[in-house]
Image: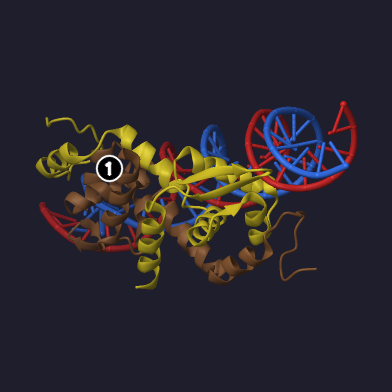
Chain colours: A brown, B yellow, C red, D blue
DNA sequence: GCAATTGTTGAACAAATGCTCAACTATTAC
DNA sequence: GTAATAGTTGAGCATTTGTTCAACAATTGC
């Protein structure tokens, strides 16, 4: 019998598996990371993020730009806000959104690089 | 009446919206990009990718490592293969998977950086 | 040839996701 | 105060997604 692995398989390279297991992150980290990347996994949110890369925009602008209802945009912005991808400021009746930091641009750029290579 | 935007809103800053619209990508690009990032949006796939960052592994190893069936792992690997995130080679009965290029590591690293900042 | 093992695939089903709709809050102008 | 506009929120519903299960293909050893 071997270390931790409980599995249906015979072939398993135990020493390698154990070695890799030690370098893996906590399960919670992968959950958090997945929740973050899920936000990039929807065309609408990508367009919102990419638009905000160009300029600060209010909800109405985004709705007009993407041909969506303000509600739909607002729902998506909420997710982006909760993960600190975007920040916002109120000015009168308008709420202006912009990117919170450079991570969004960096991630999208690498994604595009991967697609176009 | 103004350029392209057809919308329910009055507030829209037309010149800004038009300017941003010109810099947006084709809709298909956002779809492709979203499909790519969807692959990072699942904890299981993230663990697979992160494990492959450490070492080349066969399906059995991954199954043992993540406590999943070979079927589940194989299904996920298929998606990763189709998007050129992983490559593989057959050696006897085993199929060994590894990362196709540096983009996976780059994306995961930025994601972790964002979470931990 | 046959049995054993690794790996892949398609169908099925439960869980998660994104949009719509309606109701609501917030600010401005009167 | 009221009316109008911007924005948010929760429920509902159709679509998508991830795993399981069973059947199948591929390689090895006899």
- State the residue at coordinates (26%, 50%): A59
- State the residue at coordinates (32%, 36%): B29
Q: Which of D7/A55 is in front?
A: A55
Looking at the rendered structure, the number of numbered marks drawn on it comes to 1
Q: Is residue C9 left or right of residue A108?
A: right
Q: Quadrant of the N terminus of chain B?
A: top left
- State the residue at coordinates (65%, 67%): A15
Q: Is residue C9 left or right of residue C17?
A: right
Q: Quadrant of the C terminus of chain B?
A: bottom left
Q: Which of A36/B71 is in front?
A: B71
Q: Is residue A16 left or right of residue D24?
A: left
Q: Is residue B100 left or right of residue A11?
A: left
Q: Which of B82/B1 is in front?
A: B82
* Residue B109 to residue D26: above or below: below
Q: Position of residue A94 (x, y in %)?
A: 20, 55
Q: Position of residue A109 (x, y in %)?
A: 28, 50
State whether residue A115 appears in this view. Answer: yes
The residue tagged 1 is A63
Q: Position of residue B82 (x, y in %)?
A: 48, 37
Which chain contains the residue that carries disc 1?
A
Q: Position of residue A42 (x, y in %)?
A: 40, 44
State whether residue A68 appears in this view. Answer: no
Disc 1 crowd rating (10 Å Cα; few below 14, some 14-19, many 20+) is: many
SS at badge 1:
helix
- State the residue at coordinates (30%, 39%): A116
């Amino acid at each position: 019998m071997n270390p931790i692995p409980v599995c249906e398989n015979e072939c398993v390279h135990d020493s390698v598996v154990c070695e890799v297991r030690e370098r893996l992150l906590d399960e919670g980290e992968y959950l958090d990371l997945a929740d973050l990347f899920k936000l990039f996994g929807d065309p609408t949110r990508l367009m919102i993020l990419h638009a905000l890369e160009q300029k600060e925009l209010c909800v109405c602008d985004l709705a007009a730009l993407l041909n969506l209802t303000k509600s739909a945009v607002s729902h998506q912005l909420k997710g982006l806000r909760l993960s600190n991808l975007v920040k916002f400021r109120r000015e009168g009746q308008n709420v202006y959104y912009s990117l919170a930091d450079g991570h969004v641009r960096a991630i999208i750029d690498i994604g595009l690089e991967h697609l176009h290579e």
